[in-house]
């Protein structure tokens, strides 16, 4: 529960002292350095299959949970690099000396990994899950399979905000559900009351750790304080209660920033916590540039889901065409995106996939949706985002439309991933492009 704040002046003094100490450390060259990968390692694609490896050890980790909150509010400010948000003039800024509690809404592959890693570095974490996953997390803890072994985290687990009572003023909500589940999650969490008055939507920071660009836009309709995350985190939902993340030496790279643009103290504090938890977390004023670059890479998700691993020359060539279509659309829309070289330079070998026993990585998030037979898939917000922008800016997108349609059909009909031979998919892609070419000639 939220505790009474100390007198603001005293808290401000403590925070200023902490900031001064940090600045001094940085000047002395003692600031925490970004983790560097071991030299000489070969990076593997996060989408590669990993099914060989060594035995798992099973340490039971007892992260700090339910520790008293030391949170104190310092000042009120607005985020930098962006105009003030209406109604957001009294956003409390949390003093860096005091910890925050992370409420992970959607503790699946990405959410479970982020939550587990934060808990492992001593942060207070609440997991939100439903059904069999909720029951397993509650009864047996979160089992996180990572290159160090299987780590078990016994954390508070809820299926919605009600069991938590009032949310705390130091809560950070991390939305890690798939984009198509965003509305439902926000319906539940937006109106939740926060200690001291107001609702989550009015007062708490909401970080959208999702693929695509739409979740944060949906969120900003309801929440005042929205942050975007560019999620580079190969992870898998193995079975209820178990998630795996094979990246090493880092578990993932999570760019973050204020949505729609800018940075602020909350983003920096979250990033600092993530950087203590095996992530690199650059706080960037132009997050969209990274997110659109990631969107281009996620256009291949549907190819993998529909036709299996993108390994053959045929499949790689098709992905090249699908991404070229995506780039043409972004260029026509005047949307900037980080280049492949810039992304490669930043990521280097920092997130190299290691074999994990008992947790083979079959594929990316769309592949996993088909494997689990969830009945839905993210394609409307990946290939569908390109189709939407194409229609808005007059650029035909036959390949992305085709993939969006096929991926949705596979999900709806609960087909296994890779059900269509890649040759057949290429034939359909050729046909779709030819049809658009003919249509254009006729309408000229
Ligand atoms: C890059 C990767 C594999 C992990 O973040 C991904 O985006 C996905 O699975 O959709």
Image (cartoon, helix red, strand yellow):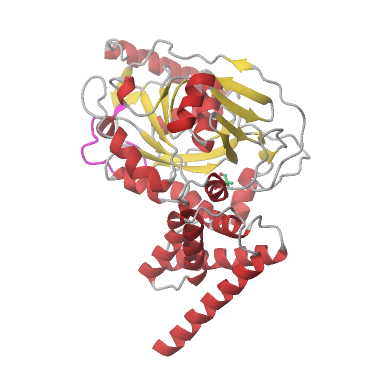
Q: Tell me where residue 245 sits by quadrant.
A: top right
Residue 396 in the image: above or below residue 239 = below
Chain part drawn in magenta: 79-92
Residue 221: x percent and y percent? Answer: 27, 45
Above or below residue 339? Residue 401 is below
Count of numbered circles on the image:
0
Residue at the spot 43% in from the left edge and 11% down from the top edge = 67
Residue at (74%, 34%) from the top-left corner?
38
Q: Is residue 147 above or below residue 69?
A: below
Side (left or right) of 341 relative to 50: left
Task: Where is residue 123? Give x, y as percent.
Answer: 49, 20
Judge whether residue 67 can be spotted in this image: yes
**Residue 185's image quarter?**
top left
> Which residue is rendered at x = 59% and y = 28% of the image?
144
**Residue 383 sits inside the magenta stretch:** no
Front one among 407 and 203: 407
Q: Position of residue 230 (x, y in %)?
A: 49, 44
Where does the C terminus fall, quadrant-wise?
Answer: bottom left
């Amino acid at each position: 529960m939220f505790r009474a704040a100390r007198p603001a002046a005293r808290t401000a003094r403590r925070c200023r002292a902490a900031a001064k100490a940090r600045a001094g450390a940085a000047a002395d060259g003692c600031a925490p350095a970004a983790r560097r990968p071991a030299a000489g390692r070969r990076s593997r694609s996060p989408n590669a299959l990993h099914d060989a490896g060594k035995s798992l050890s099973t340490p039971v980790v007892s992260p700090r949970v339910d520790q008293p909150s030391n949170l104190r509010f310092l000042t009120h400010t607005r985020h930098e690099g962006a105009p003030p948000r209406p109604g957001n003039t009294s956003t409390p800024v949390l003093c860096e000396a005091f910890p925050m509690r992370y409420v992970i809404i959607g503790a699946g592959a990405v959410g479970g990994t982020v939550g587990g890693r934060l808990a492992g570095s001593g942060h207070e974490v609440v997991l939100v899950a439903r059904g069999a996953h909720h029951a397993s997390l509650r009864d047996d803890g979160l089992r996180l399979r990572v290159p160090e072994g299987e780590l078990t985290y016994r954390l508070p687990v809820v299926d919605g905000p009600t069991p938590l009572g009032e949310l705390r003023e130091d809560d950070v909500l991390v939305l890690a559900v798939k984009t198509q589940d965003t509305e439902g999650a926000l319906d539940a969490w937006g109106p939740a009351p926060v200690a001291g008055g107001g609702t989550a939507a009015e007062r708490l920071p909401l970080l959208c750790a999702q693929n695509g660009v739409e979740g944060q836009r949906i969120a900003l309709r309801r929440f005042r304080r929205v942050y975007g995350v560019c999620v580079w985190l190969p992870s898998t939902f193995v079975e209820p209660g178990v998630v795996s993340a094979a990246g090493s030496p880092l578990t993932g790279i999570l760019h973050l920033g204020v949505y729609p643009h800018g940075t602020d103290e909350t983003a920096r504090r979250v990033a600092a916590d993530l950087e203590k938890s095996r992530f690199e977390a650059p706080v960037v004023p132009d997050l969209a540039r990274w997110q659109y670059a990631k969107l281009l890479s996620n256009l291949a998700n549907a190819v993998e889901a529909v036709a299996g691993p993108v390994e053959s020359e045929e499949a790689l060539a098709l992905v090249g065409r699908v991404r070229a279509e995506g780039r043409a659309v972004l260029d026509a829309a005047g949307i900037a995106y980080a280049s492949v070289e810039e992304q490669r330079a930043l990521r280097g070998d920092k997130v190299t996939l290691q074999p994990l026993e008992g947790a083979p990585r079959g594929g990316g998030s769309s592949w996993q949706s088909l494997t689990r037979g969830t009945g839905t898939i993210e394609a409307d917000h990946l290939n569908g985002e390109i189709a939407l922008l194409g229609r808005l800016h007059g650029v035909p997108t036959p390949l992305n439309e085709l993939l969006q349609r096929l991926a949705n059909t596979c999900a709806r009909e609960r087909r296994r991933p890779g059900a269509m031979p890649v040759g057949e998919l290429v034939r359909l892609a050729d046909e779709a492009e030819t049809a658009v070419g003919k249509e254009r000639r006729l309408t000229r």
